[in-house]
Image (tube, coloured by chain):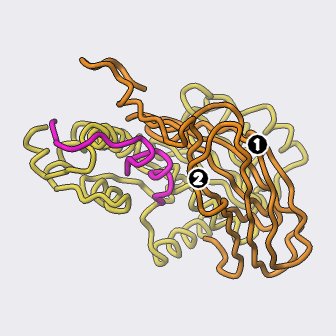
Chain colours: A orange, B yellow
Amino acid sequence: MPDPAHQLAVFLPGNRTDFRPGERLQVTVLWALERTPGPIEVRLFWMTRGKGTEDLQVVSTESIHAGAAAGEAACAFVLPAAPWSFSGRLISLVWAVEAVVPALDLAASCEFVMAPDGIEIHLESLAPRGGGAQP
Amino acid sequence: MSLRGPACRARDNPFAVHRVLRVRYAFDAAAWERLLARLADRGGRGAIVGPHGSGKTTLLEDLAGRLQARGQTVRWIRLNREERAIPPAFWRAARPGLGSADALFIDGAEQLTWLGWLRLRFVARRAGVCVITTHRPGRLPTLWTCTTSPAVLCGVAERLGVSLGPDLATTVFQRHGGNIREALRELYDCWSRAGTARTTSAAAEA
């Protein structure tokens, strides 16, 4: 159960959730903790969600030096070319950034879409008429 | 089973794995106190017993969390039909000997041969706690027996934000012989085909 004394949050610019491959992703991390946390790790990753075992790939990691118990800091990632966010019936691929305070076993994350038009690809909309297997 | 409505995206499916894994064993504070007292009475040794998909692993993980909060170092061994031997890394880590601050948790202990079990018991003899999950009682005193029912399935679905009709719950429960895990996988499929339009008449169509 999370300790209410610790607060950690991750924000994307303008609370946007639609991004494109190659775009620069600015991440803001806010924290208010009981003590100076030491370094805060910020991870860019994708994960699968759905019926089967989840898969996850950390694409990039940045470290924020948190010199006080409360503060705000920013870092940036360049989004890769792939994989794109998609959803079918059995599996979705979701992108997210996560801030982790290892010393306090604390984490916060923010999900977003990464696709050519900034819109999640729906596999059903790609299926040919008459059916066909979808993941 | 045919229900109307747009298909549900995998990440929005209430029965998606990441949501199901957040549903913990349905124990209140009093039940936890009784379980921990029972464990202490049995010298820190016990078995969580139950059939496939009855919540044994969930309860074991929740128990581990409580012991960690009390300062125990929890060491895990997870066995299944594909991985039936204790990993060499465990034997190397345990060579200095386990102590009173160590809690050894073995999920799937029924996979061990009798010889493997004896060897493990010898290594774990000084551990403060040793709890296993198993399908049948016998290797350690039974700490808790996990049972399932359509009501349990309804309760899990409720915690996932889905209200199952009793008929549908009973039908799905019986189809999977009481295996809640498999029942939840079928409910995933139901939801993915038909989106958010649900009626209890689905039971009649099943």
Q: Which residues are magenta?
A: B1-24
Q: Is residue A37 left or right of residue A90?
A: right
- Is residue B179 or residue B166 the one in the foreground? B166
What amino acid is at disc 1? Val
Under circle 2, the secondary element is: strand
Q: Position of residue B142 (x, y in %)?
A: 49, 55
Q: Which residue is mark 2?
A: A111
Q: Which residue is mark 1?
A: A78
| C-alpha distance separating marks 2 and 1 | 16 Å
Marks 2 and 1 belong to one chain? yes
As for residue B116 lying within the magenta part, the answer is: no
> Which chain is indicated by disc 1?
A
Q: Position of residue B101 (x, y in %)?
A: 79, 63
Of badges 2 and 1, the one in the foreground is 1
- Is residue B81 or residue B39 the one in the foreground? B81
Under circle 1, the secondary element is: strand
Q: Earlier in the sequence, mark 2 or mark 1?
A: 1
What amino acid is at disc 2? Glu
Q: Position of residue A133 (x, y in %)?
A: 35, 20
